[in-house]
Amino acid sequence: MTPSRPFVYLLALSVALLLYVAFPFRTPLFLAAVLTGVLNGPVEQLSLAIGGRRTLASALVTLAVLLVIVAPFASLVAFATRESMVGLDYVRDVLDIHSLGQLKAVSIPEPIDQVLTLLHVTREQLFDAVERIVSVVQDAAPAVLATGGRAVLSTVIMLIALYFLLVDGARVAQWITRVSPLSSLQTAELSAELRKVTRATVIGILTTAVFQGVAAGTGYFFAGIPHAGFFVMLTAMVSFVPGVGTGLVWLPAAASLWMGGRRVAASLLVLFCLVVVVGAEQVGKPMIMKGQFHMHTGLIFLSLLGGLAMFGLLGILLGPLIVAFFLTMMRIYERDFRRVNTSVATQKP
């Protein structure tokens, strides 16, 4: 039975209103859906191991996500904030600086002065830049605090959505199959392909992050950076940041070596990180993902870059999913519709 036109309009309106209501929480809901696709298998195995209690299994897996993924990132942010404040207080107390005007009277250490000379930067330009940075930080402080509050709320929503999706994931999948405009076979094929791409993307991201942290840690150790183990964890975590990524850690580390007079070690550390650490992200991640599903390496690479350019950090997941969705729909069209139309055309007199 074909639905009437008023029903189609009302259905479209209901979908638009639902998207409008859910739009403010699009990021945590999307992350919950992605994690559900990756963790649904472990939840089923755990549920069988504890006597079929899927609710308990879902709660345990959600708790594991909180402890293994969310807590380390929250701890890192809190640590960085606390140490930044401690460092600023230390500089202020040691140098007895309580205003930007007093900063201009402080003598610049010789290593920093040498770097400024190489860069053709004058003392006045340096202090003008410091004043602008301080002004920007002061203006952005309220926004940063508000962002922190939103991040906590988004994390809570993601964990709640993840729990309920893990509990009712099978029923949600059955409902999608019933209401999908595609046939049950086509819907199952599309769902399986998207799950495969999601799992491969997450595995590729995590594997690359671990490798980058360990590889950078090797460089820190041989370069003589103290507390190399801490910087291994820090490098692995910031590898998720688009654009700069691990450079947020190894570039300041190399700069500290350079200003400390160890210029050969600093140069070797930069060269090693550019070739091995950055190369692992640009080359290794597409290769790891290619081993999980059938897509050309160049297409995976372009989907990652395009996703980052259009959607930011979430583009690492969205880019491959969008490309996989397109390729799967084209494959279904070619197999189930194009060939049928061609065979009908050849049978005409």
Image (tube, grey):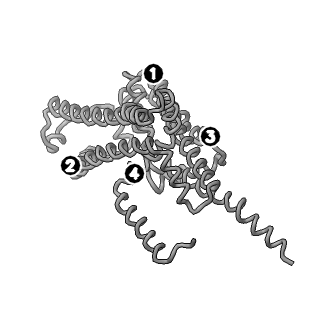
Give the Cα distance between marks 4 and 2: 28 Å
Image quadrant in which the N terminus is located: bottom right
Relative side of 329 to 347, left or right = left
Q: Which badge, 1 or 2, is on the more N-terminal residue?
A: 2
Answer whether labels 4 and 3 touch (C-beta < 8 Å): no
Q: Amino acid at mark 1?
A: Phe
Q: Amino acid at mark 2?
A: Gln
Say what secondary structure mark 1 lies in.
helix
Residue at image mark 3: 292
Q: Residue at x 52, y 73 (%)?
A: 3
Q: Which badge, 2 or 3, is on the more N-terminal residue?
A: 2
Q: Nearer the viewer, mark 4 or mark 1?
A: 4
* Residue 25 seen in render: yes
Q: Nearer the viewer, mark 4 or mark 2?
A: 4
* Residue 234 seen in render: no
Give the quarter of the image for residue 338.
bottom right
Residue at image mark 1: 221
Say the numbered circle drawn on residue 27: 4
Residue at image mark 2: 138
Give the Cα distance between marks 3 and 1: 33 Å
Residue 160 position in % (x across, y down): 35, 43
Q: Which badge, 3 or 1, is on the more N-terminal residue?
A: 1
Answer whether labels 3 and 1 touch (C-beta < 8 Å): no
